[in-house]
Image (spheres, coloured by chain):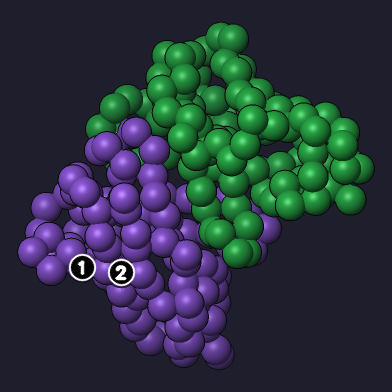
Amino acid sequence: DAGVIQSPRHEVTEMGQEVTLRCKPISGHDYLFWYRQTMMRGLELLIYFNNNVPIDDSGMPEDRFSAKMPNASFSTLKIQPSEPRDSAVYFCASSPRRGSDTQYFGPGTRLTVL
Amino acid sequence: GQSLEQPSEVTAVEGAIVQINCTYQTSGFYGLSWYQQHDGGAPTFLSYNALDGLEETGRFSSFLSRSDSYGYLLLQELQMKDSASYFCAVGRKGGADGLTFGKGTHLIIQP
C-alpha cells in the first residue's frame, strides 16, 4: 500500500493568495483527519471526516479555512486568503474504523506564507 | 476539554533505558496512544493502551494507570535512530474520532 499521499510537499505563497492542500487516504480507510503542526501550538486537529462526511470541524481556526472530501480517495484543505500565521506543516491522516487506535499520517505539506 | 503534559526534552545515552512520562486530563477516556516523529517526518504510531498495565512491543513498552491519569513510554537499548520527538495522545471521543496530542518530548541520545 502506498500510504497516505499528500501534495504538494512544500508550498510557498504570498499573503492573500489561495492555497489548496491535497490528500489521498489509504484505500479502505473510512476516517480522514487534517492536522496542523507549529512550534507554538504543537499538533492540532483541524477537522475530520467519516465516510466522506465532515463530522467535527471545531478545530478549524477561521472561516478562511475550508475542507472537502468529494469521494473516498480525495480530500482538500483550502485557505483563502492565506496569512503569514498560517505557516505550518499540515498533515493528513487516515484510520480504518472507529475505535481503531492507529492513525496513519501522510508526509505533510510544509506551508510558508510570506 | 483535553490536555496532556509531557517533558519537553529528555537526554539519554546510547544503549541505556529512558522513560517518557505523560499525564492527561480528559472528559471521557478511551486510551492513551504514543507516536514517534523524526525531524522533518510524519508522526508514526508506536503503541496504544486502553487498559491499565504494560504493553510491550520489541524495545518499546508503554504503561497506563487510568486511576492516576498517567502513562509512560519506555525505550530500551537506545539506538541513535531513536533520536526523535515522542507524543502522547488521547482520543477526543474514543479511537478514530481524532486525537489530542501532547506538545511532545524531544529525545536526545548521546553516544
Answer with left or right where residue B105 lies relative to residue B49: right
- Which residue occupies 38% across, 72% down? B6
Disc 2 chain ID: B
Mark 1 burial class by Cα count in 10 Å: few <14, some 14-19, many 20+ = some
Q: Is residue B45 visible?
A: yes
Secondary structure of the residue carrying numbered label 1: strand
Q: Which chain appears purple?
A: B
Q: Which of marks 1 and 2 precedes in the sequence?
A: 2
Above or below for A29 versus B90: above
Answer with left or right where residue A9 lies relative to residue A17: left
| Quarter residue B41 falls in | bottom right
Q: Colour of chain A?
A: green
Above or below for B1 versus A34: below
Residue B22 disc label: 2
Above or below for A77 versus A91: above
Q: Amino acid at mark 2?
A: Cys
Residue B87 disc label: none
Disc 1 chain ID: B
Residue A15, image x, y percentages = 88, 43
Same chain for marks 2 and 1?
yes
CB within 8 Å, label 2 to label 1: yes
Q: CA distance from mark 2 to mark 1?
A: 6 Å
Q: Is residue B61 visible?
A: no
Q: Amino acid at mark 1?
A: Tyr
Residue B91, image x, y percentages = 31, 44
Answer with left or right where residue A64 lies relative to residue A44: right
- Extreme front residue here? A63
In the picture of the structure, the residue carrying the numbered disc 1 is B70
Q: Nearer the viewer, residue B47 or B105?
A: B105
- Which residue occupies 87% across, 33% down? A17
